Image: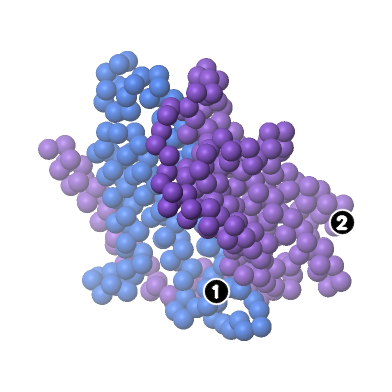
Chain colours: A blue, B purple
Amino acid sequence: MFASVWTNLDYVVPVVLFFIGLYVIIAKNNLIKKFLGLNIMETAIFSFVIALGVLDGGTPPIMGPDAHPPYTSPLPQALILTGIVVAVSTTALALSLIIRIYQQRGTIEADELREME
Amino acid sequence: MKKALVTALLIIAAIPFLFAAAALPPHGDPNTPVQTGASAYYLEHGAEEAGAENIVTDVILNYRGLDTNGEVTVIFTGFAAAFAVLLPISLIRSRTEPVSELPASPVVRFAVRLLAPFTALFSIYVILYGHVSPGGGFQGGAILGGLFIVLSAALDPARIRRLIPRQAGPWLRAAAPIAFVSMGILGLILTGSYLGFPTSEAQSAVRTGMLIVIEIGIGVGGAVIFATLFSEMEAQ
């Protein structure tokens, strides 16, 4: 078990990162901090999928005069590139909603917002 | 107390995930499905078939072009929603009288001015050369958008905002979906299927040209969206 945790450290670290993000979402009260937690979770998923495509001694999958196999798998990189940009757009939407909430209610603490209802 | 409880619960929840991570095939193993599945085909045929030497670009814009088309539309819709949330506030508050704020120090302004042309050149290089080297529309667009943000943070924001012409603004913001759809329709005319790329040897220049047009669209659209979003949020 511990030997395979060490060889698969690149898969174990995203799991740890994922739960750190989940902790931030649950435990923190500030809405911006909650979204930072969500971004940490997204980063964990991205690094996990990227790590799946890594090959021992692999080179970048760019064909050219001095390209030589083995190549790193291009598919996870392509999927995650688009995923990162979608994550940016959700973050932008979330931040503008938080700005709006602050202007309407004067606070972005989750428990104070709950009391106002 | 509550935090300790949350921590304990999350550690218990993490244990199955850790076991699963440890039970995956060893990291860097060449025989996993990620390496032997579609990737093997893309690596073998991508450079000739899809029109770009960078296989990641091939996958994004050619093999999975329809995916990326939808995804670009999702980004545009997300930013449109963000503008819709932000805009009513800035319309109520007249943004003519800015709060008197401390100007950036001369050193910062000089450094930003010095670096701006090189950053712009680098972003254009990344956008245009993304099909034969690491890079592409998304990355170059992010660099260009970052340049706009740095400029408007260090120099006069109103002057930087004028760099994006008012009439062309909405079209530039939608540049990525527009480039994608127009290339998709061009593919429809050339090959009979939406986003179809001509496959014959003689038309490899057309193929690469279509990829470059899409890259430019994504790059310009991304940069303008980042810049506009920053200036909208700054105006609050």
Residue, far left = B1
Task: Inspect the image, locate mark 1, and give the three-letter code of the amino acid beneath it.
Answer: Pro
Q: Nearer the viewer, residue B117 or A20?
A: B117
Which residue is label 2 attached to? B190
Indicate whether B231 appears above or below B201: above
Percent of width and height locating residue A61? 58, 73
Q: In this view, does B86 lie to the left or right of B179?
A: left
Quarter-of-image position of residue A110: top left
| Residue B37 in view of the camera | no
Q: Could you tell me residue B131's position as x and y percent?
A: 67, 66
Q: Which of A68 and B109 is in front in this view?
A: B109
> Disc 2 residue type?
Leu
Residue B145 vertical position relative to residue A34 in the rendered view, above or below? below
The residues bearing labels 1 and 2 have C-alpha atoms spaced at a distance of 32 Å
Please give the name of the residue rendered at 38% of the width and 25% of the height, measured from the top-left corner.
Answer: A102
Q: Quadrant of residue B160 in the image? A: top right
Could you tell me residue B156's position as x and y percent? 52, 39
Along the line of sight, the residue nearer the viewer: B154 or A4: B154
Relative image position of residue B165 (x, y in whole percent): 69, 37
Judge whether B130 appears above or below B236 on screen.
Answer: below
Identity of the residue furthest to the front in this view: B106
Residue B6's label in the rendered image is none
Relative to B153, A30 lies left or right: left
The residue sitting at 22% across, 50% down in the picture is B12
**Depicted B180 relative to depicted B40: above or below:** above
Residue at the image point whose x is 66% and y is 83% from the top: A65
Residue holding disc 1: A60
Residue furthest out toward the top: A117
Which part of the image, by quadrant, shows the N terminus of chain B? Answer: top left
- The local crowd at label 2, few if under 14, some if 14 to 19, many if 20 or more residues have their Cα within 10 Å, is some
**Chain ID of residue with mark 2:** B
